[in-house]
Image (cartoon, rainbow, N blue to C red):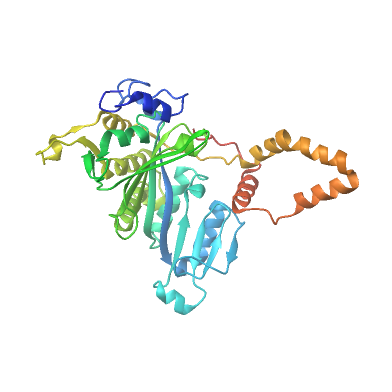
Amino acid sequence: MGKDAVRTPSTVERESPRTVTRGLDSQNGSGGSKKAAADVLGIHWLRGSIPDTMMNWLTAKLRELWGDDYEVLEHGFWVYDRHKAWPSGVKLLFHSTEEGSELTLNRIALEVPGSAIEQLDMRAIVSFMAALSIRQFQCSRLDVYFDDLQRTVTPAQLYQVVWEESLFEGLPLRHDVIGFKRCKRVIESNRQGRVHDEVAFGRRGKEGSGKYLRVYDKYLESKGETLAVRWELELSDHHARKAFASIVRTMDDLGAGPWKQEWTADVLGGLIRWCVDFKKRVAGVKNLDRLERYAFWQSILARLGFARLACRRIVKAIDKARDWVCRGVAGTLQMLRKALGDEVAIPMICDLAFGEDRLRPAHKRAIAEYLRLKGSEPVPVAW
């Protein structure tokens, strides 16, 4: 990696997974060749509202995409007092009274988190968005992401390079970020080492600009399952509506015609390009076009055009749980049976297994997804 991207290599090496070969030259040298196609672009969150006259249609559509296993709960979020909840995390929020409906202009709300979106392929996601669009859906939040599997720059490296504060006053000595005025460093460690590494730009909520960028180590967050640094952009309000409309336009005839997959990738990559830039600021130079762009960012920008769209991800929680029980619990169960006898141990074990009082939402999501995919054709697992 060039000298502008890493200033203390020994420190950076300690903060990143040892098995990873890092740097601009670690994969292909140029940073712009087609070998970078392993990088991934995707959609990670969708939120918005739709006229309450679409309640039946939307419920049927959500059942089609995420299964029939949902429940109606007598509490809601925000100003809503009811909601339908799917094990995948999808929520459909509504009012139980006409007075309540008037508060939200006779609109109901939809929340689709990343855990639900990653269960679908991108065509299904874009087609669903197109179907929402022609039914007056108003998007209020949309998240997109870019997974840099080459780990061009880690969050630790990124913060060291583009941001520096005075030791005591906290004033920025170096602010080589264009597009955001705020920067936040988030680190979490335990006795085994670092478990979370993140740099965030911007601000959420009413005081924000409608865009918020998180750069975090997905390798740490996924406990080694995904070897990537994730650039996750959260858009809200008018930024979310514009991005939603741009993505929908990649589906011809709003879902009826062919899907221009490469157009969707261009839109998602374009959102990442648009939100931020990293250039070396020079005192007295106000023309940003004259500033030199950092090599790590130039490499990522060049590779965005070759990134592939995210694949549908199969949830393996049930298989992992079964393996864990066989490997780590079987001996304990056999010990109890030998010590307590069949008359005591077997009813106790059956009571624990057949009860449902200890099922958490994560367990229910895993069960629903496993049953939904059981017997279906195998699908490729993303990264």
Percent position of residue 243, x then y: 32, 51
Q: Which residue corresponds to the image point at 71% horizontal and 33% vertical from the top-left?
A: 327
In the displayed structure, would residue 203 be above or below residue 158? Answer: below
Q: As rendered, which of 145 and 358 lies closer to the eye? A: 358
Q: Is residue 21 left or right of residue 272?
A: right
Q: Is residue 106 visible?
A: yes
In the displayed structure, would residue 225 be above or below residue 135? Answer: above
Question: Where on the picture, by quarter, is residue 73?
Answer: bottom right
Percent position of residue 27, x then y: 38, 21
Q: Which residue is farthest left?
A: 284
In the displayed structure, would residue 52 be above or below residue 218? Answer: below
Question: Where on the picture, by quarter, is residue 216?
Answer: top left
Question: Where on the picture, by quarter, is residue 173?
Answer: top left
Percent position of residue 135, x then y: 41, 62
Q: Which residue is farthest front?
A: 168
Q: Which residue corresponds to the image point at 61% horizontal and 41% vertical from the top-left?
A: 317
Q: Is residue 40 left or right of residue 372?
A: left
- Quadrant location, the N terminus: top left
Q: Which residue is farthest bottom?
A: 99
Q: As rendered, which of 176 and 353 lies closer to the eye? A: 176
Q: Which residue corresponds to the image point at 32% horizontal and 43% vertical from the top-left?
A: 267
Q: Which residue corresponds to the image point at 28% horizontal and 45% vertical from the top-left?
A: 275
Q: Is residue 305 visible?
A: no
